[in-house]
């Protein structure tokens, strides 16, 4: 085994390159060791483009012809647009060029049909020199770049042993921030962070969407364990054609409005898709049994993406005419069609409408199934399909149709109205093929309908991979439940219980939800769903409204900032049953209250639009940014609803098996690794029995063997906490954070100062991140292991004791020490402080006391005025502690600059003692800043000899439009005009070292100096 501990980064790099050129002993990537600059990359790309287009070109491209090609590629501004460009039209990416001889040609850059062969050229380059793009940043060199047909597609950043992939990811994030993935590098699709023992890959992304949670390990196919060895990763992922497939076939172009991005599939998604496609390829639509199998991927692990890719790739197979995606509820048809259309790489590119369509009605469905069309993926509901094949006029279809069934567990006849529908569709279209996707298969029914399991990825594996979160579950006692209850009493699908009739139960549940809202919602960062169901076949909507009214009563007693925005969602009743009138009156009342809350105008004719609007306010996509805190439902939104910013489910009903997993999984989507450590679940009925049902469900659905055999609960129950499906007890997290606090205390000399060595500072940094993670968890518990209430909001003093830290220590640690650490790290890595990934969690919100701060600044000003500098120095330390409490880096810089000017006697107040009034102090601060800006601008004009070109006030006005870090002040040639005006006399009036510059050099240097000054002014705002 190679000794990576002693290897340098460059040695590791050359070993990786060598390995990639001959993976598996076969010639793979060709190493182009002489390509080291961007210009050489363009030359190399030009050569390949000419080779691949010999039929269209009579001679090599001229400079002006190739400039058109460079322009198209350099104009790509996001990874999403790069993905669209590379995919092109029907898998062929082309660039239009006007040749010098007057001919007009389309040059092929990529052809998806030639993955792994044909004309496709696979090359590897390293240490590409990249000059800085933003002034003031450093030039850089990229480690390894994999080129396909000459364009950079995969970027690998390496770190040697004992370093972490996080450093590589940080580096790539830095490159994005510095606009380095532009020009020829704008086509990058995949970023890879690699050390000898850990490799993560992610889709390229815009800076604001960069999220390390989406950097994945590769996994073994058999057991979903992560691949740790870089060579195994290279074999599985970087070999040809797999690397090309990952960057094309297994990429998703997500065109969701305002959230356009590219997504790369995770290993289990790739494996499942491959297995389904192999089955479809081999399927004989004339003779074979259509049960191809089912994919069991736990809820929240991206089934829609996997099923879409499968549908998309299958629709391109020669033996498939149509792919029909069946959803189990009409309400989900639109949602799924929207998602599919957003993922369609053809849609929206060069005006194309794409290949995905949903169906308006049965005749539309018939038309789409029987007519030849590009739109060969059809999204429709089981109900619509069933009505279609049940019509007397239905004639057998000759088309070869692949059916993909979403949420397949609901289609297996469990007493719902879908029972038998699937079977009737299959009988009517006997030569079709069927694949099911489910997060919670029903054993053995799912297998009987779809055939054998094709691929499994359980909740246990997903939690271990950090693809979904575990759960923090509470079982609350409200009213006393009868001790002699039978299993039927407990199951509210069978009969009613004491919980259904008790008004006291409603009051206690509502009170608990309100009292612990801050804890469970992480101080209102997240929102919640509340499901209510009564037994004995009675309508549950009146009970939902009882809760709605109780919440309204509690809201009325609270100040506006503590009120919750609550809504109810259920369907209008058209059944003509005894409940119809009550249900519809209740719904009307709920809609009226909603209209009052959000200024909307829904009524009983627009219930669907009301529900859609409510969903947008719950999943935080509403355009007006006005969201809901809590939505009460009966059965709606408990499957298929996906909202990363929802973190709590309240349950007043009994749930079991797959339904329990489905409902719980509304809360466990990944969002922010610190703020959302788990999904919160709060149960309000039958505490012991529901805890038992929960453990039983988790045991079954976390074990792949469940598909084959039912293991006993005792064999599996103890594993749930161990697997991280259920959160640790409060005391365990408490002792873990106490240990971290102890380590930080030792490193910082009992929270006094940062240690001097960089190594020790890195240790503080890692421990602070762990402190944040654990504290965020602890703050979301509402009670300790003995059921005693705990709250950082209601009882912070006790919370400090539980942690073993004083309030003063915590404030210094999370403001002064953390702030100084961020500054040092930013300086060391030469990055902006806002890019240091350390946002502190506080026990309760820490904010600047402005009155106190103004008093301190005035006190220091008086001490400086009296020349009492020793005392002024001590006061300045107190000021720094108070300033550190701000999370706003600009505000901190502005106040610190002001304090510094007073301390150095650069700024003097008109009268002493200095003002103790916030408004007057702000005026003084603005005056100091204005003086300083004017001074800066005046000096700049003098230094660069612009006295006859522009006045200080005019230049100041121009800089007001500037955004930090952007070169944005020459859009209408404003800066160019200023320079041109100075051309004739800068040599006479500029400062000596500037006057000697040639005109070309003068313009380059002035531009740099100008933006550096504009940034300096903006950073102090």
Image: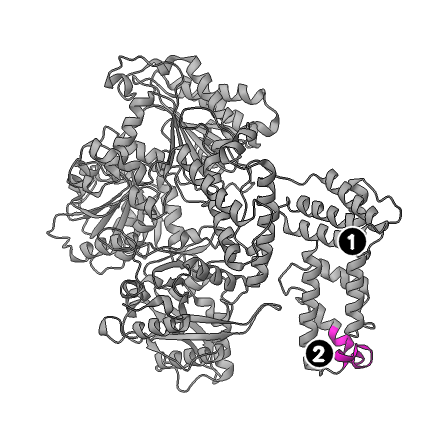
Residue holding disc 1: 903
At a point 39% along the width and 36% down the height, the residue shown is: 732
- Residue 357: mark in rendering: none
Q: What secondary structure prevails in the magenta region?
A: helix
In this image, 1020 relative to 227: left or right? right
Q: Quadrant of residue 297?
A: top left
Is 736 part of what is drawn in magenta?
Answer: no
Question: In the current view of this chain or complex, which residue is farthest to the right?
Answer: 911
In this image, 635 relative to 890: left or right? left
Please tell me which residue lies in front, 170 or 101: 170
- Give the image location of residue 840, x and y in percent: 54, 45
In this image, 861 relative to 1019: left or right? right
Q: Which residues are magenta?
A: 979-995
Observer able to see residue 855: yes
Above or below, comparing residue 126 to residue 344 in the picture: below
Above or below, comparing residue 979 to residue 830 in the picture: below
- Give the image location of residue 393, x and y in percent: 21, 40
Disc 2, SS? helix
Please tell me which residue lies in front, 488 or 230: 230
At a point 53% along the width and 21% down the height, the residue shown is: 552
How many angstroms separate mark 1 from mark 2 (CA)? 37 Å
Q: How is the image coloured?
A: one colour
Residue holding disc 2: 1002
Disc 1, SS? helix
């Amino acid at each position: 085994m190679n000794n990576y501990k002693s290897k340098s980064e460059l040695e590791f790099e050359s070993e990786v390159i060598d390995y990639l050129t001959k993976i598996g002993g076969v010639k793979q990537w060709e190493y182009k060791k002489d390509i080291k600059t961007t210009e050489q990359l363009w030359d190399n790309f030009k050569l390949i483009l000419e080779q691949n287009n010999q039929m269209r070109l009579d001679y090599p491209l001229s400079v002006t012809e190739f400039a058109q090609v460079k322009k198209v590629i350099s104009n790509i501004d996001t990874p999403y647009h790069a993905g669209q460009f590379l995919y092109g039209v029907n898998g062929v990416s082309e660039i239009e060029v006007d040749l010098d001889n007057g001919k007009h040609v389309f040059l092929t850059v990529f052809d998806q049909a030639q993955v792994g062969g044909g004309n496709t050229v696979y090359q590897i380059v390293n240490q590409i020199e990249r000059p800085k793009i933003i002034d003031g940043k450093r030039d850089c060199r990229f480690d390894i770049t994999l080129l396909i047909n000459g364009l950079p597609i995969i970027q690998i950043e390496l770190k040697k042993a004992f370093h972490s992939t996080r450093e590589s990811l940080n580096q790539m994030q830095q490159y994005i921030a510095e606009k380095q993935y532009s020009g020829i590098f704008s086509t990058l699709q995949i970023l890879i962070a690699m050390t000898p023992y850990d490799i993560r890959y992610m889709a390229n992304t815009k800076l604001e969407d960069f999220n390390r949670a989406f950097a994945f390990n590769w996994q073994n196919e058999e057991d979903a364990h992560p691949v740790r060895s870089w060579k195994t990763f290279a074999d599985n992922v970087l070999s040809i054609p797999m690397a090309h497939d990952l960057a094309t076939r297994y990429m998703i172009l997500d065109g969701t409005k305002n959230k356009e991005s590219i997504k790369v599939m995770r290993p289990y998604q790739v494996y499942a898709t491959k297995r389904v496609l192999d089955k479809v390829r081999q399927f004989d639509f004339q003779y074979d049994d259509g049960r191809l199998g089912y994919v069991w991927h736990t809820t929240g692990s991206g089934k829609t993406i996997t099923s879409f890719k499968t549908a998309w790739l299958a629709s391109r197979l020669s033996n498939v005419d149509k792919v029909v995606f069946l959803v189990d509820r009409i309400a989900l048809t639109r949602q799924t069609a929207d998602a599919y259309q957003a993922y369609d790489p053809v849609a929206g590119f060069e005006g194309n409408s794409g290949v995905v369509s949903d169906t308006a009605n049965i005749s539309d469905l018939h038309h789409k199934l029987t007519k030849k069309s590009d739109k060969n993926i059809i999204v429709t509901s089981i109900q619509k399909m069933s009505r279609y094949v049940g019509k007397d006029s239905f004639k057998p279809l000759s088309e070869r149709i692949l059916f993909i069934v979403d949420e397949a567990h609901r289609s297996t006849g469990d007493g719902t109205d879908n029972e038998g529908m699937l079977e009737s569709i299959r009988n009517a279209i006997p030569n079709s093929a069927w694949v099911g996707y489910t997060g919670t298969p029903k054993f053995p029914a799912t297998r009987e309908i779809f055939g054998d399991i094709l691929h499994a990825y359980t909740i246990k594996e997903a939690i271990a991979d950090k693809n979904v979160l575990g759960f923090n579950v509470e079982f609350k006692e409200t009213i006393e439940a009868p001790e002699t209850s039978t299993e039927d009493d407990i199951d509210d699908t069978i009969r009613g219980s004491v919980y259904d009739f008790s008004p006291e139960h409603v009051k206690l549940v509502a009170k608990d939800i309100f009292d612990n809202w801050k804890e469970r919602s992480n101080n209102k960062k997240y929102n919640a769903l509340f499901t209510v169901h009564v037994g004995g076949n009675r309508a549950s909507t009146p009970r939902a409204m009882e809760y709605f009214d109780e919440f309204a009563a509690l809201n009325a007693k609270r100040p506006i900032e503590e009120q919750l925005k609550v809504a109810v969602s259920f369907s209008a009743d058209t059944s003509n049953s005894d409940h119809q009138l009550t249900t519809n009156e209740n719904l009307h009342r709920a809609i009226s209250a909603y209209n009052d809350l959000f200024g909307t105008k829904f009524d009983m004719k627009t219930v669907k639009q009301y529900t859609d609007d409510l969903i947008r306010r719950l999943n935080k996509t509403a355009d007006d940014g006005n969201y809901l805190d809590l939505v009460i439902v009966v059965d709606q939104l408990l499957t298929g609803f996906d909202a990363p910013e929802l973190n709590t489910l309240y349950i007043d009903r009994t749930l079991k098996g797959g339904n329990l997993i489905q409902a719980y999984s509304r809360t466990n989507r990944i969002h922010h690794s610190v703020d959302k450590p788990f999904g919160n679940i709060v149960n309000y009925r039958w505490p012991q029995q529901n805890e038992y049902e929960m453990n039983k469900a988790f045991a079954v659905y976390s074990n792949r063997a469940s598909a084959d055999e039912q293991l006993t609960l005792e064999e599996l129950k103890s594993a749930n906490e161990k697997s991280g499906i259920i959160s640790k007890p409060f005391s365990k997290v408490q002792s873990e954070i106490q240990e971290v606090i102890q380590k930080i205390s030792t490193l910082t000399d009992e929270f006094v100062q940062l240690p001097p060595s960089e190594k020790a500072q890195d240790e503080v940094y890692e421990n602070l991140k762990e402190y944040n993670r654990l504290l965020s968890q602890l703050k979301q518990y509402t009670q300790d292991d003995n059921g005693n209430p705990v709250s950082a909001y209601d009882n912070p003093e006790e919370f400090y004791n539980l942690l073993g830290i004083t309030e003063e220590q915590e404030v210094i640690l999370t403001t002064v020490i953390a702030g100084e650490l961020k500054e040092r790290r930013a300086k060391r890595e030469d990055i902006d402080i806002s890019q240091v990934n350390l946002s502190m969690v506080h026990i309760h919100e820490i904010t600047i006391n402005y009155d106190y701060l103004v008093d301190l600044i005035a006190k220091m000003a008086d001490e400086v005025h009296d020349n009492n500098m020793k005392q002024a120095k001590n006061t300045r330390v107190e000021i720094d502690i108070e300033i550190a409490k701000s999370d706003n880096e600009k505000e901190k810089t502005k106040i610190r600059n002001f304090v510094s000017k007073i301390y150095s006697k650069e700024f003097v107040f008109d009268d002493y003692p200095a003002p103790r009034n916030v408004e007057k102090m702000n005026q003084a601060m603005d005056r100091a800043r204005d003086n300083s800006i004017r001074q800066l601008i005046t000096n700049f004009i003098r230094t660069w000899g612009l006295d006859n070109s522009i006045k200080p006030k005019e230049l100041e006005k121009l800089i007001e439009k500037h955004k930090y870090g952007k070169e944005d002040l020459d859009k209408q040639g404003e800066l160019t005009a200023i320079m041109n005006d100075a051309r004739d006399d800068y040599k006479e009036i500029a400062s000596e070292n500037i006057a000697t510059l040639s005109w070309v050099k003068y313009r380059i240097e002035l531009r740099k100096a100008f933006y550096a000054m504009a940034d300096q002014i903006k950073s102090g705002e």
